[in-house]
Image (cartoon, grey):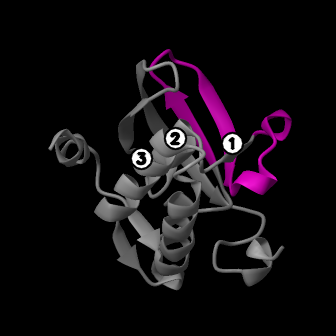
Amino acid sequence: MTLSKKSDSKPRIVVGDIDYERLCDLATGAHSRFPEVAEELQLEMDRAQVVPAMSVPPDVVRMGSTVEFRSDNAQQRRVTLVFPREADIAQNRISILTPIGAALIGLSTGQSITWTARDGRQHELTVVSVEQTGLAADDPVSQSG
């Protein structure tokens, strides 16, 4: 199966147990509306090392993290990874249900990953820095509503 080959070449990722549960549920629920991204997010969760939320190292991208990354075209961006209802590209808040959002989850500073944009082109990004800002992924308030 080609999907498993794809995940074999990706870097190891770490995801907290609370993010893991929420993101698996989100991927399942979004499958009918966004099948490609939902499948990619589920593949990321399937290959993740799941640890207790409080054990996620501070340099690992999780929900609510602000991430600075460099893309293969030498652009550097700073974004916050959020759930879909909190996304606002004007404020650099990108949804986990975007190809780049699904690619970022679980990466740590210095790691690189190849991801496929919605236009089908492959890109590589490298995480430059990670800050844990805003509502933490293990804060139930961040998911109310």
Q: Label 3 sits on what residue type? A: Glu
How far across and down, in percent of the image, does residue 61 sit? 53, 57
Residue 25 in the figure: left or right of residue 40: right
98 relative to 80, above or below: above
Query: In the rendered structure, which disc, 2 or 1, sits on the residue that comes first in sequence?
Result: 1
How far across and down, in percent of the image, does residue 44 sit? 38, 55
Q: Is residue 43 visible?
A: yes
Q: Quadrant of the N terminus?
A: top left
Does dot 1 land on a helix, a strand or a loop? strand
Q: Residues within 10 Å of mark 2 (few under 14, many from 20)?
A: some
Residue 138 in the figure: left or right of residue 47: right
Q: Which mark is residue 79?
A: 1
Q: Residues within 10 Å of mark 3 (few under 14, many from 20)?
A: many
The one nearer the camera, 61 or 32, is 32
Q: CA distance from mark 3 to mark 2?
A: 23 Å
Q: Which residue is mark 2?
A: 128
How far across and down, in percent of the image, does residue 49 sit? 32, 70
Residue at 55 percent across and 71 percent down: it is 19
- Observer-side mark, 3 or 2, equals 3
Q: CA distance from mark 1 to mark 3?
A: 20 Å
Q: Is residue 84 magenta?
A: yes
How far across and down, in percent of the image, does residue 87 sit? 77, 47
Q: Which residue is mark 3?
A: 40
Query: In the rendered structure, which disc, 3 or 2, sits on the residue that comes first in sequence?
Result: 3
Q: Residues within 10 Å of mark 1 (few under 14, many from 20)?
A: some
Q: Quadrant of the C terminus?
A: bottom right
Q: Label 2 sits on what residue type? A: Val
Q: Is residue 108 visible?
A: no
Find the magenta span and give its range: 67-92
